Amino acid sequence: MSTKDIFMITLKNANTKVSIVGDIRTVVNIYLRVYLANERLTDKQLEVATELVLNYTEYVNNAVIEPYASTILFSTEVRKNICSHLKISPPHLNNTFNALTKKNILAREGSRYLMNPALVPTNSLTFNFSLNGK
């Protein structure tokens, strides 16, 4: 018997529900931490992404459509607010934007940044796991 046979894993055919409870900032942060797990964000990148998503969601919920929502989101005033809230410098924020662009969280169109609308949290996030594509 090989080691491969000993450590065979079988997934239960059951659903497990995990609820996230907290204020909006906490829920969005945890949602992004799970949703973007493969991107391996640093703590600061996650904090910036959380701030962006919170602001972006507010704009979208108030019927601001693209490209206007991203234009507002990346305006000088909003950038200053993010820097102030997170206690980071504008160059640090710009470096973080570049890192988030490389991880497809933000997009760049010329000199403008655009938010990935898929990051707006939903009430439910479902994962389906399979072993070896089965």
Image (cartoon, rainbow, N blue to C red):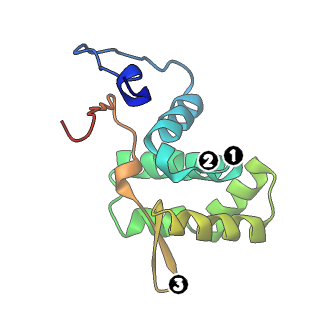
Task: Kindly identify which residue carries mark 1.
Answer: 43
Task: Kindly identify which residue carries mark 2.
Answer: 46
Instruction: Check whether the beta carbons of the residues at disc 1 and disc 2 lie within 8 A of each other.
Output: yes
Label 2 or label 3, whichever lies nearer to me, is: 2
The residue depicted at 28 percent of the width and 34 percent of the height is: 131
Q: Amino acid at mark 3?
A: Ser
Q: Crowding at label 3, few (<14), some or many (≥20) Cα neighbours within 10 Å?
A: few
Helix, strand, or loop for circle 2? helix
The residue depicted at 41 percent of the width and 49 percent of the height is: 119
Left or right: where 60 falls relative to 86 = left
Task: Kindly identify which residue carries mark 3.
Answer: 111
Between 8 and 131, the one nearer to me in the picture: 8
Instruction: Tell me the tag on residue 62.
Output: none
Counting from the top left corner in percent of width and height, residue 65 is at 32, 61
Q: Amino acid at mark 1?
A: Asp
Counting from the top left corner in percent of width and height, residue 95 is at 69, 69
